[in-house]
Amino acid sequence: MRVMTRTPHDQFSKQYLEELLTPLGQVTIGKEVPGEARQVDVFFAPTSQSAANWEPLGLLGRFAATTCLLEPFRNQPSPTEA
C-alpha cells in the first residue's frame, strides 16, 4: 500500500524501509494505532527468525529481529546535515 505524503523525503524513507524489510517479513505503511488518532509510518512484523538475513542491514536488522514500529524523521536534511 502506498501512502501519499506532503514531503518527498518522508515518502522516500517509507518506500526505502519497505524495500529493505519486505524480504524479511510483513511491512505495513501508515498503520493506524488503536485508541489514538494517529498512524505509525512503518509497522514491521518479521516472518523469519534467521539472524543471518538481518546482518547485512546492520542496526536496522537488529530492530527488525522483532515486531517493531519505525518512524523515519520526516524533514529532509539540509545539505550541511547530509
Image (spheres, helix red, strand yellow):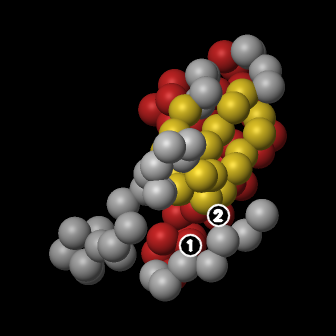
The quarter holding residue 54 reads top right
Q: Could you say where residue 41 lies in the image, as x and y percent from the top left? A: 53, 56
Alpha carbon distance from label 2 to label 1: 6 Å
Image quadrant holding the C terminus, namely bottom left
Residue, x 38% and y 67% (percent of image)?
Answer: 74
The mark found on residue 11 in the picture is 1
Determine whether label 2 and label 1 are within 8 Å by CB: yes
Secondary element at image label 1: helix
- Amino acid residing under circle 1: Gln
Residue, x 73% and y 69% (percent of image)?
Answer: 2
Residue at image mark 2? 15
* Direction from residue 10 to residue 19 in the image, left or right: right
The mark found on residue 43 in the picture is none
Q: Could you say where residue 30 lies in the image, as x and y percent from the top left? A: 61, 59
Give the camera-side residue of 48 and 52: 48
Residue 17 shows in the view: no
Give the camera-side residue of 35 and 75: 35
Position of residue 3 relative to residue 69, above or below, is: below
Q: Residues within 10 Å of mark 1 (few under 14, many from 20)?
A: some
Q: Could you say where residue 50 lies in the image, as x and y percent from the top left? A: 74, 15
Give the camera-side residue of 59 and 28: 28
Q: Could you say where residue 5 lies in the image, as x and y percent from the top left? A: 54, 79
Residue 20 shows in the view: yes
Residue, x 72% and y 28% (percent of image)?
Answer: 46
